[in-house]
């Protein structure tokens, strides 16, 4: 998941914020070449990312379409045949950009964000140029913001429980964007053999880049 933010000289309520799943090299030239645009990339353990994507696609699939078994989908994922290309290429595109231009691209891991939300929310605020003041931190603003943006809170909003993105599309319900959000849920869907295979592929693809994931323990 990627977000762009255009940072004007003064704080404004209407700051453009654009989410996308596009690979780094596919971003518009106006984004890649601008010093005013900040890019925040959040990646996830590929095992959990695969399981999340599989269930999302299954929920969005028209009822008349044939069901795809998770084993078949997993095979395609391991071959790099997934939405927006191989997961490891997607991750590495943003990782390399964050190493080359850390002032422009912030690379975050979902697992670390979940483990210490307060730390990374503060880092994110500093990165986009709006750090929390001492008074805000002392007043519990960071904690309130984390609670407001939590999976539990957002998934229970009426608009996300019953709303639709498109009125004429029964599969485009907002609730399909919320499943569990749990770290390590892959253990409930993948066999140890499947997990080891994907871990080995990812380890090989990321070798020498300085980026790694905790392997096969479900709690990175």
Image (cartoon, helix red, strand yellow):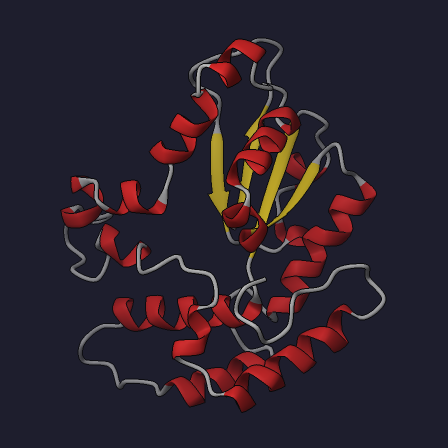
Q: Position of residue 185 (x, y in %)?
A: 42, 69
Q: Residue furthest right?
A: 208
Q: Position of residue 116 (x, y in %)?
A: 55, 43
State the residue at coordinates (72%, 53%): 95
Q: Is residue 8 left or right of residue 183?
A: right
State the residue at coordinates (53%, 49%): 115
Q: Position of residue 98 (x, y in %)?
A: 74, 45
Name the quadrant of the C terminus: bottom right
Quick one: 25 or 56, which is closer to the camera? 56
State the residue at coordinates (34%, 71%): 55
Quick one: 170 or 181, which is closer to the camera? 181
Q: Position of residue 214 (x, y in %)?
A: 65, 67
Q: Quadrant of residue 37?
A: top right
Identify whether 137 is placed above or below 77: above
Quick one: 34 or 179, which is closer to the camera? 179
Q: Is residue 16 left or right of residue 57?
A: right
Quick one: 15 or 45, which is closer to the camera? 45
Identify whether 70 is placed above or below 137: below
Q: Is residue 33 left or right of residue 185?
A: right
Q: Quadrant of residue 212?
A: bottom right
Q: Is residue 97 visible?
A: yes
Q: Is residue 79 visible?
A: no
State the residue at coordinates (73%, 35%): 33
Q: How many marks?
A: 0
Q: Residue furthest front?
A: 138
């Amino acid at each position: 998941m990627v977000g762009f933010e255009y940072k004007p000289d003064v704080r404004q309520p209407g700051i453009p914020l654009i989410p996308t799943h596009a690979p780094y090299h596919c971003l518009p030239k106006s984004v890649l070449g601008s010093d005013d645009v900040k890019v925040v990339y959040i990646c996830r353990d590929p095992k959990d990312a695969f399981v999340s994507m599989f269930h999302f696609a299954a929920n969005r699939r028209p009822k008349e379409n044939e069901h795809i078994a998770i084993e078949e989908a997993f095979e395609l994922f391991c071959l790099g045949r997934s939405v927006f290309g191989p997961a490891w290429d997607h991750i590495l595109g943003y990782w390399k950009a964050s190493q080359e231009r850390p002032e422009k691209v912030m690379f975050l891991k979902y697992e670390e964000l979940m483990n210490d939300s307060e730390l990374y929310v503060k880092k994110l605020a500093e990165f986009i140029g709006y750090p929390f003041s001492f008074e805000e931190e002392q007043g519990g603003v960071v904690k309130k913001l984390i609670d407001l943006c939590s999976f539990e809170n957002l998934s229970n909003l009426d608009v996300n429980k019953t709303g639709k993105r498109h009125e004429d599309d029964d599969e485009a319900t907002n609730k399909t964007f919320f499943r569990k959000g749990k770290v390590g849920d892959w253990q409930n869907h993948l066999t140890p053999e499947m997990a080891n295979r994907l871990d080995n592929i990812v380890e090989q693809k990321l070798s020498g880049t300085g980026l790694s994931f905790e392997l096969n323990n479900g709690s990175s």
